[in-house]
Amino acid sequence: MTADEKKIDFAVGGQAVIEGVMMRSMNSIVISVRKQNGKIKVNKKRYKTLIQKYRWLNIPILRGVINLFEMMVIGSRAINFSASEAVEDDANVVDEKESSPKKQTKASKIFELFFFIFSFIIAIGISIALFKFIPLWVTTFLEGKSTYIKENYIVFNLIDGIIKMTIFLLYILILTFIPSFRRIFEYHGAEHKSIFTYESHKELTVENAKTFTRFHPRCGTSFILIVFIISILVYTFIPKQPDFIENFAVRIAILPLIAGISYEYLKISAKYSRNMFVKCLIAPGLWFQRLTTKEPDEHQLAVGLCSLKEALVLEEALTAEKTL
C-alpha cells in the first residue's frame, strides 16, 4: 500500500477566502493564503464542533442549524485572517509555508473580537434586508394589486422565492465583474478541485487537480439555492399573518427550521449523489456554480492543495495520538 492509499477516511469541506482557501476536516481548520511576495501563509488549528463536544445535539434539523452557525463564524474569521495576510507583504516569510502565529496583545484581541462581532452583525443585517425584507415587501405590494395573488398563498410564496433568487443571482453576477471577487471565485474552483482530487484517491498534485471539475455537489452555494427552494415549501404551510411586519417576523423566526431542513437535504443528496433522481435535484446547484466558481490557475490550485495537505497532517497526527 502506497502512502497515498493510506488516506484517512474523513469528510472535508472548504471555503474560498481572499487570495486563499480554508479547509475544514473532522478535527481541524486550515487557512492558506498567497501573500504578495508569492509565498503561502498557513494558519492551522485543531477544532471540535459543538456537536462533537455535546453528542446530544446531533439530532436532525438541530444539527443543521448549529453547523450553519458555526460555519458562518468560522468563515467570517477565515475571511478576516485572509484579508489581513493577503495585503501584507511580510518580509519575515521566507519559506514556502509560514505557519507561526503572530503574538497579540490583550487590547488587540479585544478590538479584533469587537470588529468581528460588528462586521458579522452588519453582514447578517444586509443579508436579511436583501433576501428577506425586500422580496417580501415587493410581493406584498404586488398582492395588493392582484386578487389572484391575494387568494393564492402558494403563488404568493412562489413570487417571493423567485424575487429572492433573482436578487441573489444578480448580486453574484455583479461580483463576477469585480476583479478581486472573481479571484475569490477562482479560489473557490481550486477548493473544489482539491477536494475532488482527495475524494478520488489521487495524489494531491496540481497536475491531478487540474483534471477535475470545479462543480461540487456539496458546495455551500448549492446550499443557499436549496434554502430558497425549501423556504417556498415551508412558508406555504405556515399561516399567513395579516400584517406585513408580523409576516416578516414569523419568516425570520422560522429561518433556523428552513436551514436545518436544507442541511439534511444536502446531507442526503451527498450520500446518494450517484442516484439519478438525486442528480436531477442537485443539478440546479451545480449549474449555479458556473457563476460562483471560475477555473483556477496552477498557483491557486497549489494553495488549495496546501490547505488540504495540512488538514490531512493534523488528522494523521490525531489518529496517531489515539493509537498510543
Image (tube, helix red, strand yellow):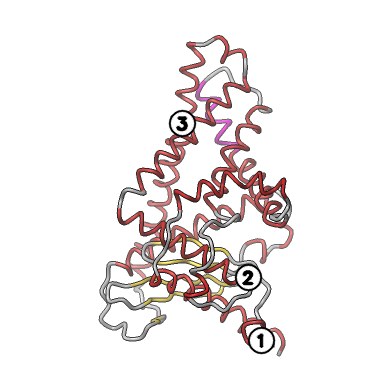
Residue visible at 64% across and 41% down?
257
Left or right: 48 in relation to 45: right
Specify the farthest residue to the bottom: 324
Q: Give the range drawn in magenta.
A: 244-254
The amino acid at mark 3 is Phe
Q: Which mark is residue 200?
A: 2
In the image, residue 253 lies in the stretch drawn in magenta = yes
Q: Position of residue 28 (x, y in %)?
A: 56, 72
The residue pinned by badge 1 equals 320
Residue visible at 28% across and 72% down?
36
Which type of secondary structure does the marked residue at label 3 adopt? helix
The amino acid at mark 1 is Ala
Toward which corner of the image does residue 102 lie, by quadrant?
bottom left
Is tag 2's residue or tag 1's residue first in the polypeptide sequence?
A: 2
In the image, residue 74 lies in the stretch drawn in magenta = no
Q: Position of residue 76 (x, y in %)?
A: 44, 58
The residue pinned by badge 3 equals 133
Which type of secondary structure does the marked residue at label 2 adopt? loop
The quadrant in which the N terminus is found is bottom right
* Front-lying residue, 212 or 18: 212
The amino acid at mark 2 is Ser
